[in-house]
Amino acid sequence: MISAAEKSLIASIFKKSEAHTEQWGEDAIHRLLVVFPQTKAYFSHVDITHGSAQIRAHGGKVMKAIAQAAADVDNMSSSLSNLSDLHAYILRIDPVNFKLLAHCILVVLANRLPVDFTPEAHVACDKFLAEVAGVLAQKYR
């Protein structure tokens, strides 16, 4: 369960990321592909080189969707429902990858927001991203 104080931290962190969604999203996706090379299988049709316009655009979409969920944590199931459908029924992404990407996003946030990403913010964002991964994996059941 995410507390009210944690919701505030989450909203604050992701509000600060809004101006950098494509860059930070690209960083997270690139990190995912390098640290967890098995995830490259889902990007076989995409230029996955660092700085790729395709990865930048996809990373931006990812971060925007997560920022929207962060703005209304209590209703993230409905805000992420279409993405859950897409990933489960059309793309058929292994849901383990959502957890891997969540970890990569945490690393990017810690690097990009060193002052704001306190231990408390880390815990709050970790809980939140775990819930995001869970929501995205719901349709697999």
Image (cartoon, rainbow, N blue to C red):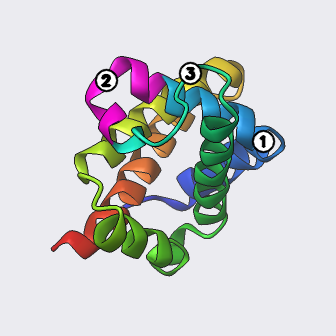
Q: Quadrant of residue 35?
A: top left
* Magenta-colored stretch includes residue 118: no
Q: Is residue 37 above or below residue 86?
A: above
Which region is colored magenta?
31-41
Image quarter hosting the C terminus: bottom left
User: In the image shown, does 9 or 23 lie closer to the viewer?
Assistant: 23
Q: Are marks 1 and 2 in contact (CB under 8 Å)?
A: no
Residue on which the image places disc 1: 16
Which residue is painted at 78% across and 41% down in the image? 16
Residue on which the image places disc 3: 49
Dot 1: element: helix
Counting from the top left corner in percent of width and height, residue 25 is at 62, 38
Amino acid carrying mark 1 in the image: Lys
Q: Are marks 3 and 1 in contact (CB under 8 Å)?
A: no
Dot 2: element: helix
Dot 3: element: loop
Which of the numbered marks, if any, corresponds to residue 37? 2
- Residue at the far right: name it: 19
**Distance (Cα) linking label 1 and label 2:** 29 Å
